[in-house]
Image: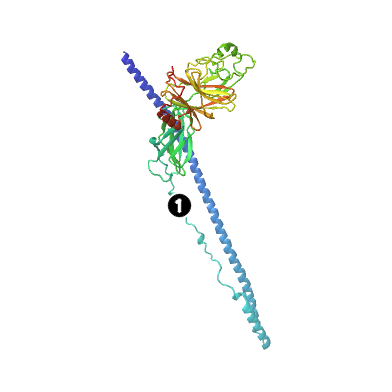
Amino acid sequence: MEAQKEALQRIISTLAHKNDEIQNFIETLNHTLKGVQANASSVIGELDEEFDGLYSILDEMKESMTTSIKQAEAHKTQELQNQLSQCSKSLENSEELLEFATRSLDIKDTEEFSKAARQIKDRVTMAPAFRLSLRPKVSDNMTHLMVDFSQERQMLQALKFLPVPRAPEIVLADCLVADNSVTISWQMPEEDNKIDHYVLEYRKTNFDGLPRVKDERCWESIDYIKGTEYTLSGLRFDSKYMNFRVRACNKAVAGDCSDPVTLETKALVFNLDGSSSHMNLKVEDSCVEWDSSGGKGQENKVKGKENKGRSGTPSPKRSSVSLRSPLIRGSRDRFTGESYTVLGDTAIESGQHYWEVKAQKDCKSYSVGVTYKNLGKFDQLGKTNTSWCVHINNWLQTTFAAKHNNKAKVLDVVVPDRIGIYCDFDGGQLSFYNASSKQLLYTFKTKFSQPLLPGFMVWCGGLTVTTGLQVPTAVKTLQKNENGLSGSASSLTNVAQ
């Protein structure tokens, strides 16, 4: 009976998984169908625009050519009209001279006849008719302005759809995920010298395998990539995976997308747990800020406990304001007294992780580190044997120290603008870095026996936490080098209980 139930349960699980796959495929088909309809309308519109543009060019060419013909006609007409005018005047003068010469033949007086003859000779010599070119300056031929569109007509008749580029292929072996950057490399299945550029599309997801249509983020795109490799940098890895696909484009059309690939973008992501933070802290996601108006009246309840194990952190003055009732939420009481603490909401149980903290310039005192979940609500980071931190005090003069189990080691380094925290749970290391230069500030070496929570303490100022970061390559290299050196354990090294 039990065996049959287990077998049936396996069948049910298989069917449920298959149904989920089919449902996802149906959604993909519906999405593709809508895409076909939308894209068909789009390309018809683009085709109309192309032909309208072609018609416009032909109309402009026709108008330009017509203007050239009319200009040639006007020029020839003017030249011929000028010749006609000259010839008409010359003919009129020649006819007048001919008439004079004819009359002169009837003169009887020898002297008058000789005089008339000399005048006729002089006038004939100067007559315009004898200086005229009796050939038209221009011809009536207009064949030099004729056009022959037979070749162009053949080209237009041979016009067809531009070949669509084939889908590229992403080379998974050449893709790289490191330092919160992703490098994607691809190639064409065959050489295509008409490719003008590529479009890379990507989106974050929490699902492994093929992209899903439902409950997924929209694709983001990088256009006009000329090469076959592109690096997306400065990413926040706040999801487990990223989907990538590429399409090739020529001058007029984009091809199909490549088969999508899914790359793991593993990083620690957490927010600050405002439900259990100190009442004097204002917490919002990844930011915490000192709020002097919070938690008034609590000091009377916890006065005796506050003095126990008092640290070097100055106690702020409290103004007399009406009591604000503490809110008890989550799985623990709020921190109180002088434990101005807030923890991360995600536990570290294995692996290597990295996050960064930036303090406000006017922050008087703050600590950053890790702790077990059992940190008491009156405890401060570094004051217990289950918490480790670096502490910065800017109250009178700046001091920088590593703290654990109520012991402190002064760090003779400049306090950086941003502190990087590296936690190797399995390797038992907690290191602090200058986040900008990746200079190692301090390393705790121990053996973690319980899950860790990122911890933060702040007074008179604020902190901003950046998560979703991979362990930087430079930090990995430094850790490897440090682990290879003998005697590198710190003076605060211990075996955590």
Q: How many marks?
A: 1
Q: Amino acid at mark 1?
A: Arg
Closer to us: 314 or 106: 314
Q: Residue 212: x and y, percent?
A: 43, 29
Residue 358's place in the image compared with 297, above or below, is below
Q: Residue 260: x and y, percent?
A: 41, 33
**Quadrant where the image shows the C terminus:** top left
Colour convention of the picture? rainbow
Q: Secondary structure at mark 1?
A: helix
Residue at horizontal 38 percent and vertical 35 percent from the top: 173
Closer to us: 348 or 448: 448
Left or right side of 155 for 307 = right
**Quadrant where the image shows the N terminus:** top left
- Residue 273 visible in the picture: no
Q: Residue 340: x and y, percent?
A: 55, 19
Closer to us: 18 or 495: 495
- The residue to which callout 1 is attached is 153
Tell me if mark 1 has few (under 14), some (14-19) or many (20+) residues whose alpha carbon lies within 10 angstroms of its own.
few
Residue farthest bottom in this picture? 110
Residue at horizontal 51 percent and vertical 21 percent from the top: 408
Residue 25 placement: quadrant: top left
Residue 302's place in the image compared with 122, above or below, is above
Residue 28 placement: quadrant: top left
Closer to us: 327 or 421: 421
Residue at horizontal 51 percent and vertical 48 percent from the top: 55
